[in-house]
Image (cartoon, rainbow, N blue to C red):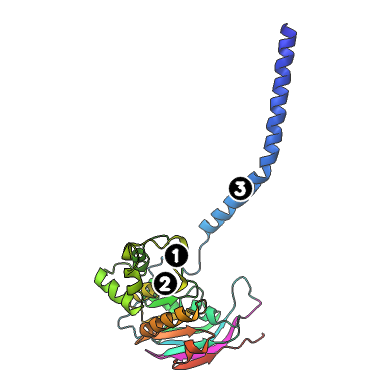
Amino acid sequence: MDYFSTMQKSNMCVIIACASIANLGTILPDVGKSLESAKNIYDVLDRKPQIDVYSKAGDKFDDVQGEIEFKDICFRYPTRPENAVLRGIDFKVEKGKTVALVGASGCGKSTSVQLIERFYDPTSGQILLDGHDLRDLNIQFLRNQIGMVGQEPVLFAETVMENIKRGIPEGINVTNEQIYEICKMANAHDFISALPEGYNTPVGDRGSQMSGGQKQRIAIARALIRNPKVLLLDEATSALDSESEKIVQDALDKASHGRTTIVIAHRLSTIQDASQICVIMRKSC
C-alpha cells in the first residue's frame, strides 16, 4: 500500500511539474517583451533632452512685439542627419502681419513652425523674436508668447471649460467672463452655450463628443486665452467641410487681428488675405 501511495505521489508531482514547465514556456516570450519594454521606459526616463522645458535658465524681456525672423536657417532632424529638411531659409514677419508658408508636402513648412516653438534647434542659422535669438530665451517665456492651432486639435477627456483653461500660462488668473469673451472671438460661445451643460459639458476622449469645427474653435479659444503675440496656424481648416471651414476661418481672422501670424495652408481661401506669401521649395544637398 505504501509503495502504490508513493508511486501515485511521484506521478502527480511529475505531472504537475510538466504542466508548470509547459505553462512557463507559453509566457517566456511575454517575459522577454516585458523586460525589453521596461528597458525602453528607463531609457526614456534617463534621457537628458537638449532642450529642457523645465529649465529656468534663459533671458526674458518686456514689451514683446512678436516680430519673427529666419536668418539663413538650415535644419536636419537628429534621426536623419543625412537629409536636410530646410536649407537657407530667410524671411521676416513684422509685428502684426500675417505671413503664409506654402509649398509641396514635405518641404519643411511644419518643421519651420516647430523651430519657432523650439521643439528643435536649427542646425545652423538663427531664428529671432524681436531681435533675440530663441536659443537665448527662457523656453517657458518663449512658449507663453505663442499660440498654436494645428490641423487636428488635441482635446482632453475633460469639460469644455477645463480644456480652454489648459492654455492659461502658469501664474496667470483668468476670470470666466474673460473666457466667455475669448470664446466669442473664436466663434465658439454660441455653440458652447447651447450644449446640454454649457461650458461644463465633457468633450469626450480626444474630443469625440464634438464635431471637427467645434473642436477647432475650442482649440482656437485655448490658444487665444494666453493672449499670444505670435499665432501659428498649421493647416487649421484643411480637415473641415466647407461650412465649418467658413466659420473657423472667420474665427481665425478675428484671432489674428493685431497679432503676428504664420499660416501654413494649401487652400487659396486661407492665405488670400496674408500680408506676404513665402514659397518653400525642397532642395537636395
Q: Position of residue 5 (x, y in %)?
A: 71, 11
Q: Nearer the viewer, residue 134 or 222?
A: 222
Farthest residue toward the bottom? 275
Q: Which residue position is annotated with label 3? A: 34
Compared across the picture, whether 13 is left or right of 210 comes to right
Marks 1/2 in contact by CB < 8 Å: the verdict is yes
Q: Position of residue 30 (x, y in %)?
A: 64, 45
Instruction: Name the image quarter holding residue 164.
Output: bottom left
Q: With respect to residue 276, does 248 lie above or below? A: above
Residue 32 visible to the viewer: yes
Q: Which residues are magenta?
A: 82-97
N-term-proximal mark, 3 vs 1: 3
* SS for callout 1: helix
Residue at position x 70%, y 33% from top? 21
N-term-proximal mark, 2 vs 3: 3
Q: Position of residue 168 (x, y in %)?
A: 33, 69
Q: Amino acid at mark 3?
A: Ser
Q: Residues within 10 Å of mark 2 (few under 14, many from 20)?
A: many
Residue at position x 74%, y 14% from top? 7
Q: Nearer the viewer, residue 281 or 88?
A: 281
Queried whether the magenta region covers residue 170, the answer comes back as: no
Q: Which residue position is annotated with label 2? A: 214
Q: Amino acid at mark 1?
A: Gly
